[in-house]
Image: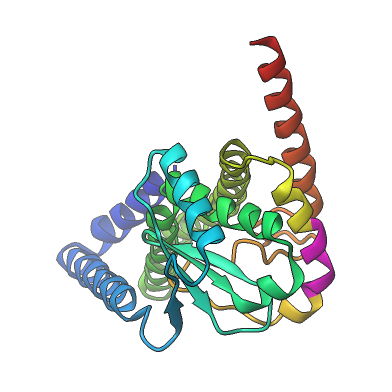
Amino acid sequence: MLGLIILLQMLLAVLYFGRVGVIVVGISIAILALMYVWISRHTLKDKYIQLTREEMPWLYDSIEKMANKAGIKIPNVYLLDDYIPNAYSFGNSVVLSVGLFEVLEEEEILGVAAHELGHIKNRDTLLFPMVVYGRYLMILLATMITLLSHNLFLKVLSIAFYILYEMERIEFFKDREFKADETAVRLLDRPLSLKDALEELKYYEDLRTHVKDSALPGIEPSIERKQKKSFMDTHPTYDERILRIILESEGISIRNILK
């Protein structure tokens, strides 16, 4: 759906502005692609410490086990030198802040890591940046059409496409968070470890409210979620996630009994 909305917005620009529209769309896509490549290649510089098996064998071995269970390549694991509890993923890498190890037990840290493996398994580390860069393109085209077009209907339609994209984007991100949680529950030896981690991390939300450390646009810290609901929230609350994790865990237990 998101891709279709972008195509419709590009079509409006091309149909109204003709060759100029084609050039603007082409240049915009090229610039965004270069931004993506540049950010991807400079993500790891001076920010993270790569974890080895010798340094933390219990974590490395558990992530390797879960990756094999998920059928994905064993990810790189990095430590972020930050006291604030945080975790996120990009490419085939998982980042865990030092702060996580200060406030969570080992099983809870594995729950957080499993959630990030869920993002990798579900290809979110590829999809999220595409959605975010798609948003940049939508903003650019909507602005161009609104400012330069003399057709009122075209302006309204372009703005409507942008609003529709925002609504779909929000729902997309929420859905992918739930899917990552569901995947994590299936990967963990103790499915409720992620629930326990989220319950503990709720108490540290005030510390993380103004801290965003995103390796790539759209790959925001996956456990950093505001509890106060707003229309523009792109992620579910802790309570919503915890409830679904409990239900998924109970479902797994029932299926195991019936086998």
Which residue ends up furthest to the front in the rendered image?
54
Residue 149 is left or right of residue 211, and the answer is left
The residue at 25%/55% (across/down) is 15
Residue lying at 78% horizontally and 37% vertically, measured from the top left: 246
User: Left of 172 or right of it: where is 111?
Assistant: right
- Which residue appears at 52% of the width and 47% of the height? 118
| Residues shaded magenta | 199-205
Q: Is residue 213 above or below residue 175?
A: below
Quadrant location of the C terminus? top right
* Lateral position of residue 66 relative to residue 198, left or right: left
Residue 203 falls within the magenta-colored stretch = yes
Residue 88 sits above or below residue 161 on the image: below
Most common SS among magenta residues? helix
182 up-or-down from 19: above or below: above
Vertical comparison of 22 with 205: above or below: above
36 or 19, which lies in front?
36
Residue 172, percent across and down?
55, 48
Q: Position of residue 149 (x, y in %)?
A: 37, 69
- The quadrant holding residue 245 is top right
Which residue is pictured at 41% across the width and 48% down the height? 123
On whether residue 73 falls in the magenta region, the answer is: no
